Amino acid sequence: MLIIPAIDLQQGKCVRLTQGRKDAAIIYEGDPIEVARSFESDGARMLHVVDLDAAFSDDPSTNRRLLGEIIQAIEIPVQFGGGLRSLADVKRVIKLGVTRVVIGTLAVESTETLKELVRSFGSDRIAVGIDARDGEVMVRGWEREAKIRAVELAHEVAKAGVERIIYTDVARDGMLAGVNIEQTLLLVRESGLKVTASGGVSSLNDIKRLNELSAFGVDSVIVGKALYEGRFTLKEASQAVL
């Protein structure tokens, strides 16, 4: 089980949202570049970065500059998502040095573009973020329902050649309320894809419970607020899955 710490960027600052709500951001002290370095020194093997400004269709220029600086400052691979809604957007961040991009809205709105991305960059570099509330997929910064169920979308992206989904339970994200084990297990069993779990991790017990799903294909988990709030350290999380 790979533990992936997250940095969510809003106007150049590290923040955490509650249930994806733009008006419920908690700003954390610290230069995002130094936060990234700290995660690396604590043993992170991958970093997850999200551009919230782009996700909400705000000006992403500050965060994109920071993304490039973070990539240059650390040696571990960076997984990046947030507002990537065209082939050109994806090409730009891959050129910056992003190892894996996470596509959300675009995967719902243009299956053909998703297929082209997989053909162009390979299935190891293109993941699909399935963000759901009560099983219904949310898009456009989690502000709109996509009118498709999470399981159905997982089937569709698998047909497009995608091998990994990042599953987030929107209702639990930023709430420190525990992970949605049942839905995560349902998605991995129904889709046959590799799954990275996200949203709601609050304790080492959550990490351990997800690790029990590794045999089914849940091989990684993104952790954000629990680390920033000191619920546990990255080292403790890594030791919990040994």
Image (tube, helix red, strand yellow):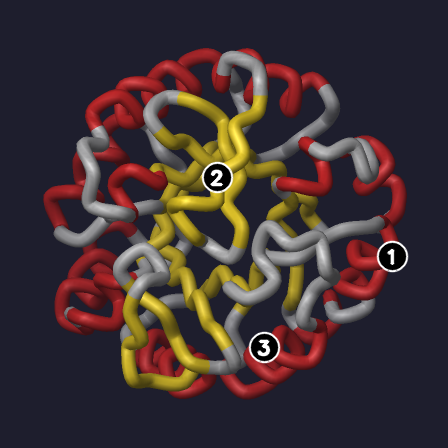
> Residue 147: x percent and y percent?
29, 84
> Residue 127: x percent and y percent?
39, 57
Residue position for label 1: 205
Amino acid carrying mark 2 in the image: Ala
Give me the disc on residue 25.
Answer: 2
Quarter of the image where one finds residue 62 = top left
Quarter of the image where one finds residue 128 = bottom left
Q: How far apart are marks 3 and 2 (CA)?
A: 30 Å
| Secondary-structure class at tag 1 | helix
139 or 162, nearer to the observer: 139
The image shows residue 149, relative to residue 198, as above or below, that is: below
Report crowding for label 3: few under 14, some 14 to 19, many 20 or more residues within 10 A (C-alpha).
Answer: many
Amino acid carrying mark 3 in the image: Val
Report crowding for label 2: few under 14, some 14 to 19, many 20 or more residues within 10 A (C-alpha).
Answer: some
| Secondary-structure class at tag 3 | helix
The image shows residue 234, relative to residue 3, as above or below, that is: above
Q: Residue at position x 38%, y 46% from top?
A: 22
Residue position for label 3: 188
Give me the disc on residue 29.
Answer: none
Amino acid carrying mark 1 in the image: Asn
In this image, 61 relative to 74: left or right?
A: left
* Foreground tag (3 vs 2): 2
Q: Residue at position x 33%, y 46% from top?
A: 82
The image shows residue 191, relative to residue 59, as above or below, that is: below
Q: Earlier in the sequence, mark 1 or mark 3?
A: 3
Cβ–Cβ under 8 Å for marks 1 and 3: no
Q: Which residue lies furthest to the front in this view?
A: 23
Q: Residue at position x 55%, y 66% from top?
A: 171
| Secondary-structure class at tag 2 | strand
> Residue 217: x percent and y percent?
64, 69
Report crowding for label 1: few under 14, some 14 to 19, many 20 or more residues within 10 A (C-alpha).
Answer: some
